[in-house]
Amino acid sequence: MESSIAFLVFAASLWAAWCRGPQLAMLLFTLGIVLTVAVYLHHASEALPLSF
Amino acid sequence: MTTRMAIKLNALALYAIAAVLLAAFYYQFALGELPCPLCLLQRVAFTALAVGPVLTLRHGPRPGHYGLAIIAALVGAGIASRQILLHITPGDPGFGSALLGYHFYTWAFLCFVAAIAASAVMLSLQSQYEDNAPSPGAFEIAAVGLVIAVTLINAAVALAECGFSWCPDTPMHYELLYRPG
């Protein structure tokens, strides 16, 4: 469900970019980016098979 | 670079983003490949990449619009690079099918890097900022409508796949459509 919410936030940002002002679009864009990074960190818990 | 040409190029970028997302649908529905959570997040990043071009089509070219595209592409490249690193060890078959020898997360990484480079080049072309933006035509309106429609379909498909909880790391079926037994 987390991806669906992120898609909906960016759909709202796209709609705002077209129908409303840039400020609302950028606010929703920022919200979407924060949400996407949070979801990424939730799923990126597995250790990578790397050695540096 | 005239304002009109910059707007046309931004509209073409929206068609390219929609084409990438529609190609992902083809592999999901025609070949039955369910996207993993990181794959879905890369699709999310592609929709985020569209916000800057839509702002340009509606309000004219601004450096900040290209900045939004670069931020979205950096996030997408970061997610795709993690998936590449998850499957980088020798003998690992990777996740999903490959196209021209590369898995889709590798193609996504290359697309995001190309988007960063294209946005940086566009950002630096000063002459596009001098004129007022013309009213959007049918070509631009169709591009915006297409990318919003594909984003909403992605939201519905992701909900069908993951249900009302966290998406499983390796999805095996559509949670909302699955009837055990």
Image (cartoon, helix red, strand yellow):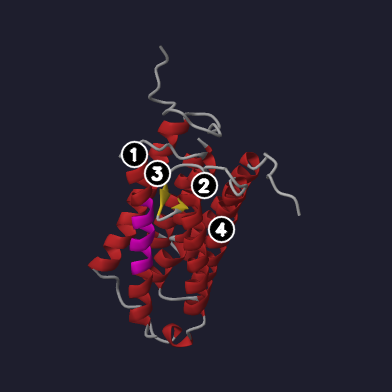
Q: Compute the Cα span from label 2 to label 4.
A: 11 Å
Q: Nearer the viewer, residue B171 or A22?
A: B171
Is A5 on the left or on the right of A34, as rendered?
left
Q: Where residue A40 sits in the image (x, y, percent)?
A: 60, 45
Q: Are marks 1 and 3 on the same chain?
A: yes
Q: Compute the Cα span from label 1 to label 3.
A: 17 Å
- On whether residue B19 falls in the magenta region, the answer is yes
Q: Are marks 2 and 4 on the same chain?
A: yes
Quadrant of the image for the C terminus of chain B?
Answer: top left
Is B155 on the left or on the right of B92, as rendered?
left
Q: Compute the Cα span from label 3 to label 2.
A: 11 Å
Please, which residue is most extreme toward the right here? A52
Give the residue number, with chain letter if any, for mark 3.
Answer: B154
Name the N-terminal-most of marks 3 and 4. 4
| Range covered by the magenta-colored residues | B12-21
Name the N-terminal-most of marks 1 and 2. 1
Question: What amino acid type should be assigned to the residue bearing mark 2?
Answer: Leu
Give the residue number, with chain letter if any, for mark 1.
Answer: B31
Which of pointers 4 and 1 indicates the residue nearer the eye? 1
Q: Are marks 3 and 2 on the same chain?
A: yes
Which SS class for mark 1? Answer: loop
Which SS class for mark 2? Answer: helix
Q: Nearer the viewer, residue B80 or B75?
A: B80
Which of pointers 1 and 3 indicates the residue nearer the eye? 1
| Chain letter behind tag 1 | B
Per the rendering, the mark at residue B41 is 2
